[in-house]
Image (tube, helix red, strand yellow):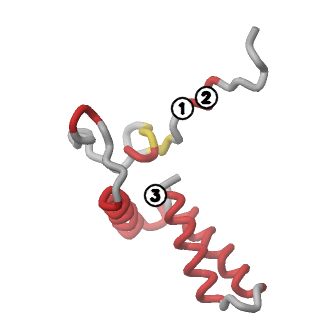
Amino acid sequence: MNNPNDNPNDNLPPMTATEDEVKPTKQAYRKSGDSDGPSGARNSGGADFVGAAQQEATGMLKDGMAHPSTKPVLTGAAIGAVAGAILPVVSLPLGLAAGAAYAFYKRVRP
């Protein structure tokens, strides 16, 4: 008998909608011909993160509010600004930058 807590969608990767199709989030901005290296293995080093962050930032700058990452990053910036205004040690600009950086990081590495 199936457990009611078992959801068949739990094992699916997070999805991102792009122009023509829906792809797993980490693969959303790769070109279809790009390879993950030998036998499809991904390198989880720092260069991979920097490249993904650069692609994400470039996409956000080019597409503006139409890019799927822009609104979550702006929401993170707003939450950080509110936290910066409330907390005595953190200033408003620092909270804004920290909130945006955290939201951007979570978009690149969920």
Point out residue 82 in the picture as x, y percentages from the top left corner: 72, 80
Quick check: marks 2 and 1 in contact, CB under 8 Å?
yes
Per the image, label 2 sits on a secondary structure element best described as helix
The answer to which quarter of the image holds residue 88 is bottom right
Label 3: which secondary element: helix
64 up-or-down from 98: above or below: above
In percent of the image, x 52 and y 72: which residue is there? 101
Residue type at mark 1 is Leu
Q: Observer-nearest residue: 12 or 20?
A: 12
Q: Which residue is mark 2?
A: 9
Amino acid type assigned to the residue bearing label 3 in the image:
Val
Q: Are marks 3 and 2 in contact (CB under 8 Å)?
A: no
Tell me what residue is drawn at x 35 percent, y 61 percent.
46
* Number of residues whose C-alpha sits closer than 10 Å to that of mark 1, classed few (under 14), some (14–19) or many (20 or more): few
Measured Cα–Cα span from mark 3 to mark 2: 22 Å
Residue 36 rendering spot, x and y as whole percentages: 27, 41
Q: Please tell me which residue lies in front, 97 or 42.
A: 42
Q: Position of residue 107 (x, y in %)?
A: 50, 58
Marker disc for residue 108: 3
- Residue identifier under label 1: 12
Mark 3 Cα shell of 10 Å, populated few (<14), some (14-19), many (≥20): many
- Labels 1 and 3 touching (C-beta < 8 A): no
On-image quarter of the N terminus: top right
At a point 76% along the width and 26% down the height, the residue shown is 5
